[in-house]
Image (cartoon, coloured by chain):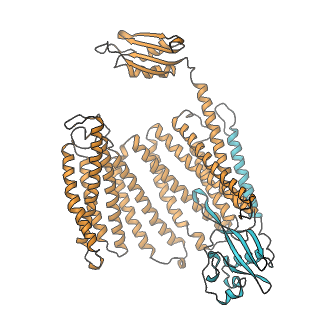
Chain colours: A orange, B cyan
Amino acid sequence: MSGTAPVAGRGAQPGAQGTVRRVIVFLLLYVLVDVAAVGVSGLLGRLLETRPEFLDGSGSLALSLAFALIGLPLALVLWWFVWRRLDGADRSSVAWGLYLAAILTTALVTFTVSLLGMFADLIAGTWSPDRLATGITWLLVWAAHRWMWSHRTKSPLHLTAVPMVLGAAYGLGVGVSGAVGALAVLFGAAIMPVHAQIGTPWWVIALQSLVWFVGGALVWWWHWARERVLRLRGGFADVALVLTGILAAGALTLFGIGTALYVGLRAAFDRSAPWDDLLDPLGPALAAAGIGAVVWVYHRRIARERSTATRGATRLVEAGLGLIGAASGLGVVINALLAALSAPLAGSDARALLLGGVAALVVGAPVWWLSWRPGREEDAGAAGRRIYLVAVFGVSAVVAVVALLTVGYRIFEIMLDTGAGGSLIERIRAPFGLLVATALVAAYHFAVWRRDRAALIAEAPRKTIDRVILIAGESSSPALEHAVAAATGATVTRWMRADLGQPAAETSPEAVATALAGVSAHRVVVITGPGGHIEVIPLAESAR
Amino acid sequence: MNETTAGKPDRTLIFVIATVAALVVIALIVVFTRGQGEPLDESTPAGVVQRYTQAVIAGDDETARGYLSSHIVAECTTAVPGPFDGMRVTLASTTEHGESADVGVVVSYSGGGGLFGQSGYQYDETFRLVRDDGAWRITATPWEFAVCSETSL
């Protein structure tokens, strides 16, 4: 399903003109399909609605008729026009792949939300024919485009994996939120005192969440296993894997564990709140921790089988999550320390605040330590690690500056007596906590970045050539270019010879690298030719 | 402790860990050993506001009404104050104008927990008081502290 070279065919138009035509045509088709689907689902909803009192007025009927009777024929005509041309440049265009990705994702989200919402309504005793109509219509739209996506001769050649990867990520999100919702209600019913459970019976809400879980899991399984997203490697598939299976699932897990720990610490050390209030977040926290951990562990196992870059990204994302938790926790601990220094008129003391900070710190710090593994410098030169260090340093520096500005504003506000009286400490405790935490984060990551950089410079071979002009035959020149760049660190400009005719005997990259050893000049010309001929010509400084 | 590839200890990391550990230990000691502050003088506007807010947060509306102006109590339409979960009230300012006074407070809320510690926000509010039979009594409160809807600002 990977991209292949564009195929020239009938209907091919020169450059920009063809691109603009395709963008406009597919955009128009997307809009017309949406309009037609809205119109048809509106009419179908009226057909399924058996209760006259629930029917909208004739205004909405007129709109549905207009959308269906004008939008649908236009969409079909335009589709037929597009479909007939899909054997040349149109098929290999990015616009075709983008259109299918957009409409497949739109249709998937719309029909699943509508149908699952209808089933959830049925459990609560409500019949929603409009949702059924929308679901059926968009299911047909999805099925038709799924057929086009897999067509033997007209399926897109670019962005083929995008709709399936997005579908898997969407299904995972819906399934996880449904499972967390169902378990949260179940745990809540088990934990909370009976007198605190009022309103809709817990099992109704749990069953409704279960519907979303089953629907989401089916969508995920369809894309992940049946459409073989699991087997995709690299690019967007790996990015989605890290973002959903590692980042989102990790954040959900740590959030759940942190909240559960916070409730436990408050139950042990701060009993100022009634049990109902204290235990209220425990059910959702346990559900989030449990479901998040299952998803996280599963995707970690998958990521371990992927490329080195993906494995590195997984580790760095986990380190980032732990770092955010630990830094936020430290900020809150400092906030609580300062709050304890000023006695309040009334209300809670700083214990709950402190325990919240300690819970975040205790959860975040070990995750950061185990993922980052301080002192590990084998991958000091890896691009991912460099980007991570710069990003963490940059973001924490920005947050620190904003916190510093807030502290400064509060200080000047009190100094200038603008009417904001009271304790300075009370007013600056939150931004000051954030300032200290982010300053420590920025300082550590800046030090690591500097150390990595110094190590890289020390290990890098001494550069004796700034620029190489490589003149070689067409077949061998890419390999030679890489060899020259790796051996010298110089910028390489590649010129291809037109006088060699048929491919001659390849010049070995190793031989070129050897020929450049010991050469020292600002610019060097390297000429390779038949029979392994290599000529290295250092240019004089005056040649600049 | 951690060492870099050059064999030198990572002094920055040691400093960060030591700072974090020290801050956590100090915070635990201070928060858990510091008692409640001294109650303010009941004859001052701030003292009245302190007792009133403590009573409202404790759910003791009857005691709270005792700190309201007599004409407010006479016309009182019961209101439900709150929410108070995670709320903290600190004194910002007291301004007396002869027979009336304004007491400014900072109201802070914190809540949540989880991965990002606690979220929170704060804002300024004012209580208005008058002298009523020689004692300071409240005539207007922020809406979240109103036990009689007539006092709600």
Farthest front residue in view: B97
Q: Is residue A298 left or right of residue B4?
A: left
At 61% from the left and 85% from the top, the residue drawn is B78
Q: Is residue A290 left or right of residue A529?
A: right
Is any part of residue A518 visible from this angle? Answer: no
Q: How many marks?
A: 0
Is any part of residue A64 visible from this angle? Answer: yes
Q: Which of A543/A340 is in front?
A: A543
Q: Which of A166/A293 is in front?
A: A166
Splitting the image into 4 quarters, where does residue A370 fall? top right
x and y percentages locating residue B64 in the rendered image:
70, 82
At 20% from the left and 42% from the top, the residue drawn is A85
x and y percentages locating residue A514 in the rendered image:
48, 13
x and y percentages locating residue B40 in the rendered image:
79, 74
At 53% from the left and 34% from the top, the residue drawn is A382
Splitting the image into 4 quarters, where does residue A331 fall? bottom right
Q: Which of A293/A509 is in front?
A: A509
x and y percentages locating residue A225 in the rendered image:
34, 50
Give the quarter of the figure containing the N terminus of chain A. Answer: top left
Q: Is residue B31 left or right of residue A4?
A: right
Q: Is residue A237 left or right of residue A320?
A: left
Q: Vertical placement of A75 versus A49: above or below?
A: above
At 25% from the left and 63% from the top, the residue drawn is A39
